[in-house]
Image (cartoon, grey):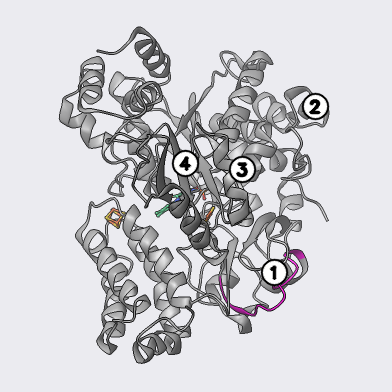
Amino acid sequence: MLTDKEKDDIHKEMNQYPYPEATCIDALKVVQYHRGWISDDAVEDIANELKMTVDEVDSVATFYTRIYRKPVGRNIILLCDGTSCLVMGYESVYEYISKKLNLKFGETTDDKRFTLLPVSCLGDCDHSPALMINDDHYNNLTVNKIDEILEKYL
Amino acid sequence: METPLTQYIKPDRLPPGIEDYKKAGGYSGTIKAIKEMSPSDIKTLVKSSGLSGRGGAGFPTGVKWELVPVDANGNGYKYLVANADEMEPGTFKDRYLLEGNPHQLLAGMIIASYAIGAQKAYIFLRWAYKKAEAIIRKAIAEAYDAGYLGNNILGTGYDLDIYIHSSAGRYICGEETALLNSLEGKRGIPRTKPPFPAISGLFGQPTAVNNVETLCWISHIIEKGADWFRKLSLTGEGGTKLYGVSGRVRNPGLWELPMGTTMREIIYDHAGGMLEGYKLKGVIPGGVSTDFMIESQLDTKMDFASVRAAGSRLGTGTMIVLDDKTCPVAFIHSMIKFFAQESCGWCTPCREGLPWVEKILASFENGTAKYDDIEILEFHTQYMAPGNTFCAHAPGAMEPLQSGLRYFREEFVRHINEKHCPWR
Ligand SMILES: Cc1cc2nc3c(=O)[nH]c(=O)nc-3n(C[C@H](O)[C@H](O)[C@H](O)COP(=O)(O)O)c2cc1C
Ligand code: SF4
Ligand code: FES
């Protein structure tokens, strides 16, 4: 069941489209915002709300990279492995984070504090290497900046 | 030197609010357009300026707008969409405009919408641009309050609403027809053309899709004219261009320069040349879907025609420099990995071909590639050439690969001979 808040937020998004199904992506984002990820139940809830089939909603949910169909940690580290960041040395940043948190790309820490994912560009290419944690961008990364950045996220 | 698009952008400072922007004359082109000009006057003026699309393909903007039927079909709306998806690695130009001066974009979108008769407009925004999203939302609210958006704009009887859709990721959504599917809440898969979006676009209605940088020009052109616009450029193609450089240069960044500034001037004068100890080996001129250029081509004028004549594409004008201490195979592999991941999966050559190419490139990097593999890579550049796939995604991916195989063949062969990456 969608909460009243979730319903409210979805209906606000609906105003900008001519019919409810067009809100599908925004609805997924709303529910993910409240629940952290999109479970099978969440897919069903959205399908009911938008009068779509579960398969229709799931086909959309599984298409988009920033919709998580598996549980994720409280904070998501998106480390850019794009071409500019490759040139500027994202690999050493990856190795450092990976060792520090004992994580590979695609994994979540046991305490659910972090999930580490690769991303193909963040638009920070002139200040690469770059990463994003939740909604915050960090760039011109060096290994010795990482500890301080991670400390902000509990 | 005039820099119309970036004149009010001060890095690390808040963008101009609507009052400041109005005081600077920012909305005067918009007022002139909707109060004094007919839609066809505007289209004629933009066409005569020669403004071409800054999203990568360089299609003449005025011509695109004229393709939108003057009369709406039935009682549905027509739509304008600002393409702010910008997900190509190495590209960060629209972000600068969105964060730095949102009202410039809105001023242009109002005129463009009026010119094609659109009553609804969307900004399709790259998911990662959270700061830009907040800035644009605020600017839109200000524009409603000032009477530039909403019903009966400035008493002219013209109605327009502008909405933001922040994407949920996937590079393919930058392709205009995939973008339309995504805006409709669907999977972002390209559509068959024809029908072109101008005839049947968003929600089946006539639609124009334009890049952010393109739209930011419109109010300036209305205000100052087509001649002024053409004279900003060093070549026949009008205007200035946002050029960016990333990689191992002294001063990576973004600059607004006359269209047709040479690659040498951009990389050596503005980006400060290569960092101490690094040599320039190649340049991806305009996003990862453009062919490599090499040192002997540095004097190429960076406009659509000259870069095409040099065997590549201007694309987005944001370059990535390949240096001598970065493995060219790893560099190409990173681009192909991106394209393989981002394939929408709709057509077979791209869905199957790109991962195959990606695996072969990985085998070069880990030292298990064989001589035949170079031929297999070459085969794929033909197999995914323009016309063989449903959209331009896979052909775009093949551009840096085919030119990379040509320019860096020796380095590919070294990986096979030495059975490991010589750069590691
Ligand atoms: C795979 C692919 C990705 C694209 N991504 C973008 C993009 O992120 N932004 C953009 O403006 N155009 C992008 N384009 C080009 C658009 O399809 C379209 O041509 C452009 O938005 C039109 O605007 P313009 O005429 O102002 O350049 C892309 C094209 C392809 C084939
Ligand atoms: S070329 Fe690739 S991205 Fe384009 S339609 Fe085919 S599978 Fe999709
Ligand atoms: S390539 Fe990493 S931010 Fe663009």
Main SS of the magenta part reads loop
Residue highlighted by disc 3: A148
Tell which subunit mark 3 falls on: A
The reply to the same-chain question for discs 1 and 3 is no
- Say left or right for B349 vs B159: left
Ligand 1 within 8 Å of disc 4? The answer is: yes
Q: Please report the bounds of the magenta region as a residue range.
A: B270-283
Amino acid type of the residue tagged 1 in the rendering: Ile
Q: Nearer the viewer, residue B315 or A9?
A: A9
The reply to the same-chain question for discs 4 and 3 is no
Q: What element carries label 2?
A: helix
Q: Is residue B25 magenta?
A: no
Amino acid type of the residue tagged 4 in the rendering: Val
Tell which subunit mark 2 falls on: B
Residue highlighted by disc 2: B20
Please report the residue visible at 62 percent of the width from the left and 53 percent of the height from the top.
Answer: A144
Tell which subunit mark 4 falls on: B
Q: How far apart are marks 2 and 3 (CA)?
A: 38 Å
